[in-house]
Amino acid sequence: MSVFYRERTRYFAATIGTLLFAALYECFSHQVYSLFLLLAFLFPLLGGALACTLLLKSSAWMRVDGFSRCLYRSGIATLTIGSLFQGILEIYGTTNRLSAVYWVVGACLLLAALLRCQRSRFALAKSPRRTDNSHSKNRVPHTASSYRNVSQRH
C-alpha cells in the first residue's frame, strides 16, 4: 500500500473525528454556534485527503521526502486545532490574542513543507544521473592489502 493511500486514510479519519467532536460540542453549547468549530473539518479534508488524492494522480510529486510530509501534517494539524480552539472560544464568548499564533504557525509549517518539497524536487532534477556501476553492492573494495596480495602472487 502506498504512503499516500495510508496518509489519505488518516486524513479521512481525522476529518471524521473533527466532525464528530464539533457535532458533539455543538450539541452541548446551548444553541450557540461557531463557524470555526463547524468548518474545522475542512483542513484535514481539503488540505489532507484531497491533497493526497492529487498527489496520487501526479507522478511528479511521488518522491516527497519524509520531513516535508511531517511538516505538512503538522501544519494541517495546527490549523485544525487552531480552528477548534477559536470555535470553542467563540462559543464561550471570549477572545484570546494567542489564538492568532495557530494560524501563523500553521501557515509557516505548510509553507516550509511546500518550499522544502520544491527545493528537493529541483535538486533531484539538477543532479547528474549515474551511468557507471560504481555504486553496485557486488563491487570489491580496492584496499592496499588487496593490491599487496595480487603483487605477491606474481
Image: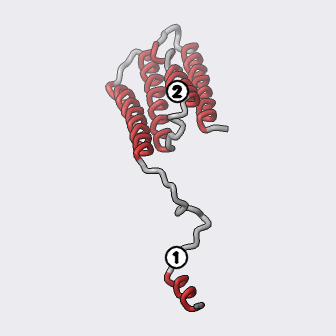
Q: Residue at x 47, y 30 (%)?
A: 76
Q: Which residue is mark 1?
A: 142
Q: Nearer the viewer, mark 1 or mark 2?
A: 1
- Which circle marks residue 34 in the picture? none
- Camera-nearest residue between 145 and 29: 145
Q: Residue at x 42, y 49 (%)?
A: 127
Which residue type does callout 1 highlight? His
Residue 1 screen position, x and y as percent: 67, 38
**71 left or right of 49 in image:** left
Dot 2, how many residues are within 10 Å of its Cα: few (below 14), some (14-19), or many (20+)? some
Q: Residue at x 59, y 18 (%)?
A: 24
Q: Secondary structure at mark 2?
A: helix
Which residue type does callout 2 highlight? Ala
Q: Which residue is mark 2?
A: 51
Dot 1, how many residues are within 10 Å of its Cα: few (below 14), some (14-19), or many (20+)? few
Q: Residue at x 59, y 34 (%)?
A: 4
Q: Secondary structure at mark 1?
A: loop
**Residue positioned most to the right:** 1
Task: Classify the position of the C terminus by image quarter.
Answer: bottom right
On screen, residue 11 above or below 129: above
